[in-house]
Image: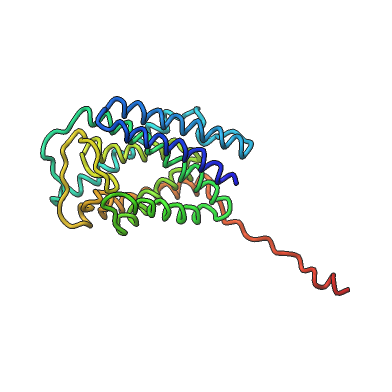
Amino acid sequence: MRLLKQLGAVGAVALVGSLAVNAVQGNAFLTLGLGVATAALALLAYAWVVRRTERRAPTEVAGAGAGAALGRGVLVGVGLFTAVVANIALLGGYRVDGGGSATGVVALFGFMAAAAVTEELLFRGILFRIIEERAGTWGALALTGLLFGLVHLFNPNASLWGALAIAVEAGGMLAAAYAATRSLWLPIGLHFGWNFAAAGIFGADVSGRSGPAGLLDGVTSGPILLSGGEFGPEASLYAVLAGVVLTVVFMRLARRRGHLVARRRRTAQPDTTATLSR
């Protein structure tokens, strides 16, 4: 029940926030304000429902050290996506056709803030954390990563390959970031940095979605495995490789810190047959 209650509380904020943000598309500053407000309210809802259902302090969203962890995540996310785009561009799969829009960057900041926070709370803060208690870290990483990829099948221009790419590079990498730190701030920053770099800086589609113009007017072309096709650079093999490398780094760090959780084994039931026959 705690799983359902937590998903319900955060999911309700995410849904209402998404509807509000979509309703004001075209107004950059309203989009920014509603996006940031959605992120803040989702964090408050998560902290409240965890306290109510688990009778503990939600240390994974504690304020101490949040800014530094969030900043590190953003820098890693931006740097990682920049490396992906640079490799695609070297083979002619990405070019810049001009400048973008400053107001578009503002709107994308708000939109991506809401998306990064709500998705990390739902998938890593709730699903991964609770599934990990029974399935262990590796089991939870595989299950929630696959689920994270599958939900992207409902996006525009989605494909099975794009969903699998997201499952590996994002679902695995972000879960591993949480496992390594036992905090949601790093994966939130990483998620935001990756998405904002894609749309807000390089003007690329994010998981099949086209939004407001970013800082640059970017165009991708060429084979899907190089450029990602209509789904965007996240379906590129370069993005998958980058995600896998960082997943391995985070999981090695999690093991070194003793953060890996073993799968819970079923307790053997006592044999009462002999007792009853006596």
| Any part of residue 82 in sight | yes
What is the x, y in percent for residue 123?
A: 46, 46
What is the x, y in percent for residue 176?
A: 44, 47
Side of 21 relative to 102 (left or right)? right
Position of residue 235 relative to residue 197, above or below, is: below
Depth check: give the residue in front, 219 or 4.
4
Depth check: give the residue in front, 209 or 60.
209
Depth check: give the residue in front, 14 or 136.
14
The residue that appears at 20% across and 28% down in the rendered structure is: 102
What is the x, y in percent for residue 224?
A: 21, 56
Identify the residue at the far left of this view: 97
Identify the residue at the far right of this view: 278
| Any part of residue 75 in sight | no
The residue that appears at 42% across and 35% down in the rendered structure is: 16
Q: State the quadrant of the C terminus.
A: bottom right
Identify the residue at the far front of this view: 23
Side of 259 relative to 270 (left or right)? left
Position of residue 67 relative to residue 244, above or below, is: above
Position of residue 65 relative to residue 150, above or below, is: above
The residue that appears at 37% across and 31% down in the rendered structure is: 71
Displayed quadrant of residue 55: top right
The residue that appears at 54% across and 51% down in the rendered structure is: 131
Picture colour scheme = rainbow
What is the x, y in percent for residue 21?
A: 34, 33
Total residue callouts:
0
Side of 160 relative to 264 (left or right)? left
